[in-house]
Image: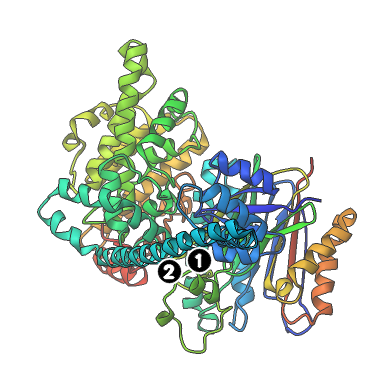
Amino acid sequence: MAKLYLVRRNLETFAGPMTLVEMQEAYKHMQFGLQDEVAGHCGPWVTFENLERIKKQYPEVARIVHEEMMAGWNVNSDSEGKLINEDTKRLAIKSVRGVSLAVFFLVVAVVAFIAALYMASAGKTAVKAKEQQESALRPRDLDGMLERRDSAGFDRYIELHRGELVAQVSQRQTLDEGWLPYLRHFAFAHEGQIVGLNPKYLRGSAAAATPVDCSLQIWRRRWRSSSNDWNDLLLGHELVRAHWARLMAWDPYWIKRREHTGWIGTQNYYAACLSMADKALTEVGADLVKVMPTEEWDQLGYARLKARLAWLQASLKGTTVAAIAAIPEAARVLVNDSSSVALWTCFEAAADLSALTRCRRGLSGAKDTTWQAYNDERYGWNLLRLAASTHGTLPADMRGLMLQLGPKINKEDHFTRFDYRPEASLFLVLTRSNIPAEKVVEKAQTEFPSVKLSH
Amino acid sequence: MIGATDIGRRRKNNQDSLYYDELASFGMVADGIGGRKGGDIASSMAVNGLRKAFMNSDRIRHEEVGPFLTSSIDRMNAEILERGRREQEILGMGTTLNCLMFVGEKLHIAHVGDSRTYLYYKKHLFQLTLDHSVGNFLERGWLPKSAVQTGAKEGALVRAMGLGERIDVDIYEILLKPGQMFLTCSDGLTGMVEDRRIAQIITENLDQFESLPKLLIDAANSSGGKDNITVLLSHVRG
């Protein structure tokens, strides 16, 4: 039976198991690259570019690496050296004419050897200089550019060093440090991706419930492939299990309460994702309008989606919106609208209990118990938001409503998968306590230091 | 899918946890961190928490598997830490986790710690997951030598549930082919039985799939059974 090998790409996906011949073919079809790893039966993982170790562990793979993968990279191998020596030996035992020919070749070989030595030392110097240049790259070089708002200079810098930065980030395997804040800033100022960088690094470790890839390209695909499902969510038929639908249900206050490390300034992955989704939806809208009348494509729910995205982005930017009247122009579509996203926006825009109660009247139209329960939960989180910002003890009507909702409150939003444990805990304590709300929040804050519960 | 867990020959209790549901194509192995009080609690919290999250979720699509696994593990990690803070006698408990989800034509593996998942295919055995150990992290340059305490063992864990507020979970995915077999196990097996011997046992007993977990556990116990042993096998049939 032929020996099989498995290739591991990016420490995430695999190609194979496959034979040597299949591996050669797979490489030609760019199924993996030099930076990926190979393992044989019960053997260790070795990266293809580590030729020395490949030779030691999997000598039969080394041949392919040399012939196929490193061709064109000007990489020398020992085997070439051996061939030259053998040829020289054969020449040496020929006739006198042969001997003079051998002497000639010997002289050429010596000259070539000296030249090679010179070139090697020059090469080493070049490598050293490159290493020095690499080690001279410092994230703080970019801080000045950001302070001066020199985005052209910032972009130039990242583009110039992209390869080195991507390699450094991928090698460190950390998700929030070093160059990552800058790479994220660069990526989401453009198309939400960096060539050669796995999107998981752009997302980082904090946003576990979000899509791994929030690039413009992926969002275009998500919107295009889902247009027939938009109304299922918007009209309350189904909590559609897809990233675009979950994004619509994101709770801006939940996001604002969380810490977002590894980002520059007030940026975070949620805001970046929303911005890419919005850009992509605009593009998809522009395409739709070419193929069908405006009224028709708008019936798909386009305007409502755009309005919800506008609302979410505006509320994440930190502008405290006291009433729905203050929401961006595009989001006015949601005023007096009966869609699910209009209801959620209404909850989130409510500045006091009476406004929130008015929004809740929309709940009576909910189609089934799943929707009713989900909307009740969202109402509950906004009730908590208002309760947490109350000065003094909670008004009786507010406490009464919280008591009613208590059993319906879950520790996790099962749709967006946002973790509401700190909020659920605060909800419980606020409902039961008679001391001023600000004191309760202060105490709860010590239990969950990384979540800003007063927001 | 078939699995079994065993206390081994030296330990007083079994800190490993195992769960699998063949119909749902979902299974996991967790190994409570040795020497720490409450390792059994941590491993069962991880396994039960993930099981509940899976049961409560609707059908999960491909692109949602990663976010589902990472967010669920993240939450369980927080719960393990929280319980540890509440109950002083189990403060610092932790666990490894290897969780397998078969969705469509792919297997997704969520991995934290040094429990392992292997692929067995046509008499070949490949370790799919990378142990989150000090030795591996040093070798790959992910951990500066200065960050490692003097005397720290190479096998000491760098990542596990319950070790810190933040948890980096490796998510692997592999395309399924008929004939593949996946072996997920705690280090009670791999610490006692060489990979080649594991491959040999599987090859020699392929026709007795149901008894393979026991055969592998027996091999670990015959070699000393120094730790708890848990084995989960998943076979992809044509």
Pointer 2 local density, CA inside 10 Å: few below 14, some 14–19, many at least 20: some
Residue ID for mark 1 = B77
Residue located beneath label 2 in the image: B165
Q: Position of residue B232 (x, y in %)?
A: 74, 60
**Disc 1 to disc 2: CB gap under 8 Å:** yes
Q: Nearer the viewer, residue B98 or A420?
A: B98
Q: Whole-percent x and y of residue A96? A: 60, 60
A75, above or below A375, in the image:
below
Residue A411 versus residue A245 in the image, above or below: below
Q: CA distance from mark 1 to mark 2?
A: 7 Å
Numbered tag placed on residue B100 in the rendering: none
The answer to whether residue B109 is left or right of residue A323 is right
| Crowdedness near tag 1: few (<14), some (14–19) or many (≥20) residues, C-alpha within 10 Å | many
Residue A214 placement: quadrant: top left
Q: Nearer the viewer, residue B226 or B36?
A: B226
Q: Residue furthest left?
A: A148
Helix, strand or loop status at disc 1: helix
- The chain that hosts pointer 1 is B
How far across and how far down the image is residue A315, in percent?
24, 44
Q: Give the residue drawn at x 37%, y 40%.
A: A215
Q: Earlier in the sequence, mark 1 or mark 2?
A: 1
Q: Amino acid at mark 2?
A: Glu
Q: Residue at x 56, y 80 (%)?
A: B154
Question: SS for tag 2?
Answer: loop
Observer able to see residue A205: no
Q: In the picture shown, does residue A141 fall above or below A212?
A: below
Q: Residue at x 45, y 42 (%)?
A: A374
Give the percent coordinates (x, y) of residue A266.
22, 54
Disc 1 residue type (three-letter): Asn
What is the quadrant of the C terminus of chain A in the image?
A: bottom left
Give above or below for B86 relative to B30.
below
